[in-house]
Image (spheres, helix red, strand yellow):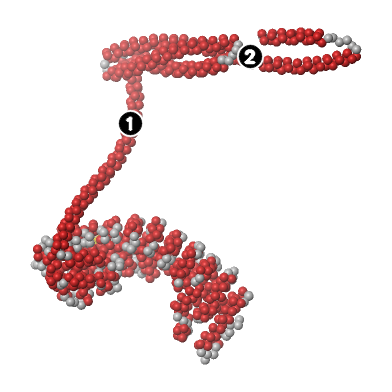
């Protein structure tokens, strides 16, 4: 193909520089072929040859062929093969991994790998080139898409921020790259994950876009498909990408939480009973999963977001699952350490999670609290250093803003609650505090200090703790024992740092005495404490001891600032005079500043988690650094204040205390009122609920009462019938039978009368309507017949009024009869009750009265029937008259219509006749004229007109006869 002989055919004496020159010329020829050849095959072969040379000769190929390769990508898009070769060649010259193929040290000297890759990247990354590369990635061809993904990934590695900015402003740039996750070819999908990792590094805007492109759902699906923690390197890549999306990005964290993705993390941490033989990849995956949980609850996140995630993790069971791993056996040490750190941040500052963690027990016999088991590891010097730091962090997070937990820990040290049969957290802390291992001393002192942070009550309670130092000697207080160990210094042989124990004890004492005047008084009550502190501060010691001197100055300053002047020999003024005489205010201030100037102080102030490279660097606690920052300024001010200023300050403090007491009193009153109000609200709500229940019960009972009433009435009727039947056998059955049958018959007749009354009323209203209608329809009549009908209608209306009055009287009579019927029914019921009791004589008299009333009632009913019969006859006669009137009116109306039609027709006939007569007159005139012309004799017109007049009279006579008809 004209490329020259292979490299192995060159004679061996040829110098390397000559060989380089030969290859440079060869590369130049290939570039010319790419640029000038018109045949696609020829250009494709030249690009393939450049690809083969690009790994060894990056500099030559990159400098000579870069522009030609970019031109190929622009012009030969239709040929996937040449595009693939061009992309591979660009990848080789930009990637630093290809430098491994260099043959000699001379070549390595000529090529600086990192700088070369960066330079070629800067040459390539132009807006149009990156946009072109993004469009190439839309090609589905494997030989185009895969090298395109690799090239874009290496560009992001070399010049991340610039490439990110170009992709961010490209239309649909991020969306095109997200489509790589849906590629069915695993190689492209996996390399797409690597590309997205580089794309999302340190760019919040791209992270948000990727998250809203449904990245969380896709990545979690891939993790599940690959086997979660048991998966391979793909799971690791997904977890790294998730960390990029969530770390320091509050918007994505909130989106992840609200999308219910936290629940999907729980199955990752399900471990079996046998946890031995974990693969290295599984350990890595689980480590990253734990770190992902920590990203969501990191102390650096906004407090609201962290607490919300903590709440979700407890509700979905994720915290419970982590505690299972914490107490499981066979878990690798680094996983156990990271799990402890993760649980620490999940419970930090969350009261619900802290309470749950306090209830977790280790699966031992007998069961022990998880806190006790963890503290046993912390004070055990044989445990790994990172594990002990993790346990300390867990204990600190458990006590963070948890006054309840602080009280429980301090309570295990008090005499009344010590249980000799089992180890407690307090016993373990005291054991660690006074052991010969300096790291255990420091950890126990810091842990105990966290049990006292911002809790004046527990500081006072801890003063009650008494320790038995040796047999036969009286017990000493914990405070005194700490100062005793501090005074002994290096006299006790300890393992580890010489300074670490004293630093830990001084931090504990400073935390204990801060804002607790009673503890300050106890400390100053020991006469040897103040001389010890002044002696330590005034000495000129080495650099290691300077930290101890600074902490002693801080402790003495706390004794001055929080002194209540209850001890005459150690008042504020006397302590300040002592400092001025033995140390000097300037030297005291200088020694105090040693703390904040120390490098370990600045490291500890960065994060809450104790993270130290070695045990010797473990000097300061994060919370203590915040305390020092607050106290340093106020202590220096207190040292330089005069006695008068102190007095004024004391007065101000007292007034402030009084003011605070008043405020606290009112706060307590308000709190109590709030509690009472809440109780009253709960009472009101409960009473409302009870009221609703009672209303429902009452309505149900009313329905039942009504049902019982109906049943009772039915039984009463049945009982009346039974009693009547019983009396029929004992006395006169015919009379009682007559009463019951007659009453029922009377009821039926009254109901019938009511119905008839209603029917009559309806018919009367209908007749009234008809009469009114007839009246209006006949109002315009002009004949004598219509007048007669109107008179008949008037008579009918008068009769109707008379009938109405009679019906009104009858309705009144019916109402009266109903009232008498009700009285009769009541009396009959009463008589039935008397009959049941067996009083036969009274029943007989009442029966006679009832018989008389019934007889009168029957007489009234007969008269009412007669009246109704008369009314019905009158009604029927009235109805007949109305019917006849209706028929007469209808006949008259029909006749009227017929007459009007006949008149209309006669008028039409007369018009037709007149027309015919006029025609005939014309014809007659014409005929007469013709006859006259012919010489015939014709009658005069007057004779004809007289004849016509006679005819018209005859017609008028006929019309008048028709009208009479």
Residue 206, image x, y percentages: 44, 64
Q: Residue at x 25, y 72 (%)?
A: 597
- As displayed, is residue 963 above or below residue 210? above
Crowding around mark 2 (Cα neighbors within 10 Å: few <14, some 14 to 19, many 20+) is few
The residue pinned by badge 1 equals 702
Residue 169, image x, y percentages: 48, 64
Q: Residue at x 28, y 69 (%)?
A: 604
Can residue 786 be seen here? The reply is yes
Tell which of 818 and 837 is nearer to you: 818
Residue 491, image x, y percentages: 15, 75
- As displayed, is residue 694 above or below residue 540? above
Numbered disc 1: secondary structure:
helix
Frontmost of labels 1 and 2 is: 2
Work out which quarter of the rendered image holds the N terminus and state it: bottom right
Residue 567, image x, y percentages: 10, 63
Q: Which residue is drawn at 22% across and 76% down?
A: 543
Can residue 433 be seen here? The reply is no
Q: How many marks?
A: 2
The residue pinned by badge 2 equals 895
Tell which of 639 and 680 is nearer to you: 639
Residue farthest toward the bottom in the current orientation of the protein? 13
Of callouts 1 and 2, which one flags the residue occurring earlier in the amino acid sequence? 1
Work out which quarter of the rendered image holds the C terminus and state it: top right
Q: Going by the image, does 22 lie left or right of 632?
A: right
Q: Which residue is drawn at 66% across and 8% down?
A: 964
The span from disc 1 to disc 2 (Cα, nearest Å) is 70 Å
Numbered disc 2: secondary structure:
helix
């Amino acid at each position: 193909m004209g490329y020259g002989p292979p490299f192995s055919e060159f004679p061996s004496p040829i110098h390397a520089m000559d060989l380089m020159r030969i290859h440079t010329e060869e590369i130049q020829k290939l570039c010319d072929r790419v640029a000038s050849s018109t045949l696609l095959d020829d250009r494709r072969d030249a690009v393939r040859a450049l690809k083969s040379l690009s790994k060894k000769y990056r500099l030559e190929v990159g400098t000579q062929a870069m522009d030609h390769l970019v031109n190929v990508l622009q012009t030969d898009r239709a040929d996937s093969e040449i595009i693939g070769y061009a992309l591979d060649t660009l990848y080789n010259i930009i990637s630093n991994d290809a430098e491994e193929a260099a043959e000699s040290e001379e070549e390595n000297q000529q090529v600086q790998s990192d700088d070369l890759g960066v330079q070629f990247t800067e040459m390539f990354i132009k807006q149009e080139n990156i946009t072109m590369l993004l469009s190439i990635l839309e090609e589905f061809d494997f030989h185009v898409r895969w090298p395109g993904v690799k090239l874009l990934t290496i560009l992001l590695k070399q010049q991340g921020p610039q490439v990110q900015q170009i992709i961010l402003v490209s239309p649909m740039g991020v969306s095109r790259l997200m489509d790589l996750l849906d590629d069915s070819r695993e190689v492209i999908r996996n390399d797409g994950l690597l590309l997205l990792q580089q794309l999302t590094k340190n760019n919040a805007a791209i992270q948000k876009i990727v998250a809203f492109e449904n990245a969380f759902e896709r990545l979690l699906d891939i993790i599940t498909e690959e086997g979660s923690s048991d998966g391979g390197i793909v799971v690791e890549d997904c977890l790294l990408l998730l960390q990029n999306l969530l770390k320091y990005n509050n918007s994505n964290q909130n989106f992840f939480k609200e999308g219910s993705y936290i629940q999907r993390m729980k199955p990752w941490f399900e471990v079996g009973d046998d946890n031995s033989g974990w693969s290295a990849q599984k350990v890595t995956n689980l480590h990253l999963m734990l770190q992902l949980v920590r990203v969501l609850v990191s102390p650096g996140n906004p407090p609201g977001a962290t607490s919300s995630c903590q709440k979700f993790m407890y509700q979905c069971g994720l915290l419970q699952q982590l505690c299972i791993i914490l107490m499981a056996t066979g878990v690798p040490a680094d996983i156990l350490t990271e799990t402890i750190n993760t649980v620490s941040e999940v419970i930090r500052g969350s009261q619900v999670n802290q309470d749950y963690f306090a209830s977790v027990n280790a699966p031992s016999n007998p069961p022990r609290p998880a806190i006790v088991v963890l503290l046993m590891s912390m004070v055990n010097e044989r445990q790994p250093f990172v594990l002990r730091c993790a346990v300390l962090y867990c204990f600190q997070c458990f006590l963070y803003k948890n006054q309840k937990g602080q009280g429980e820990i301090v309570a295990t040290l008090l005499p009344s609650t010590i249980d000799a049969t089992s180890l407690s957290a307090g016993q373990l802390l005291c054991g660690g505090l006074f052991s010969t291992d300096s790291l255990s001393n420091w950890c126990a002192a810091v842990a105990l200090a966290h049990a006292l942070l911002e809790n004046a009550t527990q500081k006072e309670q801890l003063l009650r703790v008494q320790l038995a130092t040796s047999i036969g000697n009286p017990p000493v207080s914990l405070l005194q024992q700490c100062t005793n160990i501090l005074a002994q210094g290096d006299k006790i042989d300890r393992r580890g740092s010489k300074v670490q124990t004293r630093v830990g004890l001084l931090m504990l004492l400073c935390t204990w005495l801060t804002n607790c005047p009673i503890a300050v008084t106890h400390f100053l009550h020991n006469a040897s404490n103040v001389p010890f502190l002044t002696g330590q501060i005034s000495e000129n010691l080495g650099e290691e001891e300077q930290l101890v001197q600074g902490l002693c100055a801080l402790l003495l300053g706390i004794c001055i600032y929080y002194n209540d002047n209850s001890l005459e020999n150690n008042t504020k003024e006397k302590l300040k005079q002592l400092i001025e005489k033995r140390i000097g205010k300037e030297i005291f201030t200088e020694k105090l500043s040693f703390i904040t100037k120390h490098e370990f102080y600045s490291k500890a102030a960065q994060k809450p988690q104790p993270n130290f490279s070695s045990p010797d660097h473990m000097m300061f606690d994060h919370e203590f650094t915040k305390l020092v920052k607050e106290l340093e300024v106020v202590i220096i001010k207190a040292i330089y204040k005069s006695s008068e200023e102190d007095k004024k300050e004391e007065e101000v403090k007292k007034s402030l205390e009084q003011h605070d007491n008043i405020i606290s009193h009112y706060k307590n009153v308000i709190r109590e009122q709030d509690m009472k109000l809440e109780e009253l609200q709960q009472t009101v709500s409960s009473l409302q609920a009870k009221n609703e229940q009672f209303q429902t019960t009452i309505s149900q009972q009313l329905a039942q009462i009504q049902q019982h009433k109906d049943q009772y009435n039915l039984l009463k009727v049945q009982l009346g019938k039974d009693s009547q039947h019983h009396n029929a056998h004992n006395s006169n059955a015919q009379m009682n039978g007559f009463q019951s049958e007659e009453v029922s018959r009377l009821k039926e007749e009254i109901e019938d009368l009511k119905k008839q009354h209603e029917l009559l009323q309806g018919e009367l209203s209908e007749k009234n309507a008809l009469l009114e209608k007839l009246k209006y329809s006949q109002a315009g009549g002009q004949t004598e017949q219509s007048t007669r009908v109107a008179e008949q209608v008037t008579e009918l209306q008068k009769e109707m009024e008379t009938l109405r009055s009679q019906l009104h009287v009858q309705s009144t009579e019916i109402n009266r009869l109903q009232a008498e019927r009700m009285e009769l029914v009541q009396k009959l019921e009463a008589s039935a009750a008397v009959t049941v009791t067996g009083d036969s004589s009274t029943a007989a008299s009442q029966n006679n009265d009832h018989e008389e009333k019934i007889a009168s009632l029957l007489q009234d009913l007969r008269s009412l029937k007669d009246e109704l019969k008369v009314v019905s006859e009158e009604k029927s006669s009235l109805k007949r008259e109305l019917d006849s009137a209706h028929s007469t009116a209808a006949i008259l109306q029909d006749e009227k219509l017929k007459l009007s039609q006949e008149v209309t027709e006669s008028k039409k006939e007369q018009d037709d006749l007149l027309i015919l007569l006029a025609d005939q007159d014309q014809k007659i005139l014409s005929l007469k004229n013709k006859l006259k012309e012919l010489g015939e004799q014709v009658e005069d017109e007057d004779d004809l007109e007289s004849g016509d007049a006679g005819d018209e009279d005859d017609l008028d006579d006929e019309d008048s006869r028709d009208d009479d008809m």
